[in-house]
Image (tube, coloured by chain):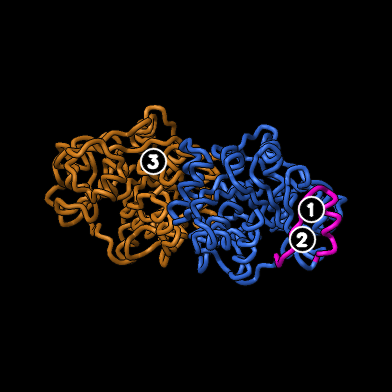
Chain colours: A blue, B orange
Amino acid sequence: MKITALAGGIGASKFLAGLARVMPPEDITIIANTGDDMEMFGLRICPDIDTITYTLSGVVNQQTGWGIEGDTFECLRSLARLGEDVWFNLGDRDLATHIYRTNQLKRGKTLAQATDDIRRSLGVRSPILPMADAYTPTRVITDEGDLHLQEYFVRRRCQPSVKAIRYENIERALPARGVEQAILDADCVIVCPSNPFISIGPILAVPGIRDLLRRTKAKVAAITPVVAGRALKGPTADMLRSLGHEVSAAGVARLYSDFVKLFVLDKADIELKQSIEQLGLRVAAMNTVMTTMEDKENLARRTLELG
Amino acid sequence: MKITALAGGIGASKFLAGLARVMPPEDITIIANTGDDMEMFGLRICPDIDTITYTLSGVVNQQTGWGIEGDTFECLRSLARLGEDVWFNLGDRDLATHIYRTNQLKRGKTLAQATDDIRRSLGVRSPILPMADAYTPTRVITDEGDLHLQEYFVRRRCQPSVKAIRYENIERALPARGVEQAILDADCVIVCPSNPFISIGPILAVPGIRDLLRRTKAKVAAITPVVAGRALKGPTADMLRSLGHEVSAAGVARLYSDFVKLFVLDKADIELKQSIEQLGLRVAAMNTVMTTMEDKENLARRTLELG
């Protein structure tokens, strides 16, 4: 069975860590959001790709969910001394990834090639594909102005009120090499429990991808990132509200209803089953809160069984 | 009294550290060799500029003479894990300098501007000017082929036999902003005790600089990098030999005899005084071996008195 997963950052990584333990990791192809990418100190940073890569390689910082366990911050401190504004945490080991990637891009490699090099070097057996090679930073239009996603998310800690989301440059992006095949050839496509606007939204906005998801013969499933009207992490619930959607798993299901066939709902939200089924989706309710590795494996196993 | 110093790496830095203690550092302008610059991991590394900057800011690693005291190497180790060839040592704090500089260049600043930013941030009061903004890597033609200076120097530890030295791209370089004025307006120009082929040679090869040194009304002095037929550090003696020059302070003096007025000889080489005077140079003999800070200060003070 070949699985293709659309993935954002931390929530997706937890699910993928479980999935890679209940099936052969080689058979999981991950299409990662790059809308949260940014240029910092002249380096290309891909937070979602790196969080997935570090999680699957086992080096991720378990406390934060991102970055590398036990990383040090000497370089960043020295950059601060040189007058750089260091609001985004980059450890010394993590920086090696960004330096390596930036250099590969400078030498004419694609982001897809650099991403593949890095995941192989770190011993990750699942192919990780960026959604696109192009740089398409997500902009968050807020009451404090037009912010890069990471400025909104990290620097301003999701405090500004969100008025709109814009995927800059997305109209010129193409799905990265392998993305089309991964969607069309999969037995099952899984939309990971990630924010629909800033993690999954950019992937769906790459010209062609949403249509591939509608056309594929794969079963397409989505796992809710919202439980009991709240996101486990991050601003999903706030964004649903401020962008005019129902603040619930049903609100998320509606955003995907043109291509998703199966929606995995948390059992705490069982009362939403019917309204999601009315969108034309099959619904399965289970525990979607991933605290332990067993939770992650169970969610992955049960999703696979349904898919 | 305004001093301008032509400087390479470690030998020059030691002298400059002494000089900055016997006169106001603001009145010393340093024109630094950039022929040893290289691109590594996509970053612009300027070893001589950095050695001078770190030495004058007091953060230099005293044991090695280069790099930052107490630096760590986490990023480099991670780059090795990603498959990079890490033969050139770059510490985590040191990397901040290269990341910062590379980013400034990418944003359109000149190397002179980036260098000035960095030395100010690190509290260095003497202006440090790169000889040129252009990238003019020194190539060493050896029995093992045509090597970048740093490949010859660091990777191959000066083992290959040197047949010729070539300053790539130098014909298109211009003296960096401030260099001309620093040479013409100085009361005294000092050629630091550095290798004449790979440290001072590239500076003299920048179109216009040698002529400025001949034309300036400043007293131009040079301090020998060779004592008793040997260099204190590095391949100067070997290079003099293999490039067909006399392996002595007199051999170095001859290379500078068209623009240097005063040659500072080590007292161990007093027997060379006459042959250097025959080149038309004044000669002063003193202790030029800098072991303690007192040695550095004494050499600087006595050179200033003569200049």
Q: Secondary structure at mark 3?
A: loop
Amino acid type, callout 1: Val
**Res. B218 mark:** 3
Q: Are marks 2 and 3 in contact (CB under 8 Å)?
A: no
Near-viewer residue (B53 or A64): A64
* Rendered location of residue B134, percent (x, y): 44, 35
Q: Is residue B112 left or right of residue A290?
A: left
Q: CA distance from mark 2 to mark 3?
A: 75 Å
Amino acid type, callout 3: Ala
Question: Circle 1: is it few (<14), some (14-19), or many (20+) Cα within 10 Å?
Answer: many
Amino acid type, callout 2: Val
Q: Secondary structure at mark 1?
A: helix
Residue at 74 percent of width and 59 percent of height: A284
Do the residues indicated by labels 2 and 1 lie within the same chain of the protein? yes
Q: Is residue A202 left or right of residue B198?
A: right
| Magenta stretch, residue numbers | A269-288
Q: Is residue B65 left or right of residue B233?
A: right
Q: Are marks 2 and 1 in contact (CB under 8 Å)?
A: yes
Q: Quadrant of residue B44?
A: top left
Q: Chain of mark 2?
A: A
Q: Which residue is mark 1?
A: A252
In the rendered view, would you say A274 is above or below A72? Answer: above
* Rendered location of residue A274, percent (x, y): 85, 57
Q: Chain of mark 3?
A: B
* Rendered location of residue A275, percent (x, y): 86, 55
Q: Which residue is mark 2?
A: A226
Between circles 2 and 3, the one closer to the viewer is 2
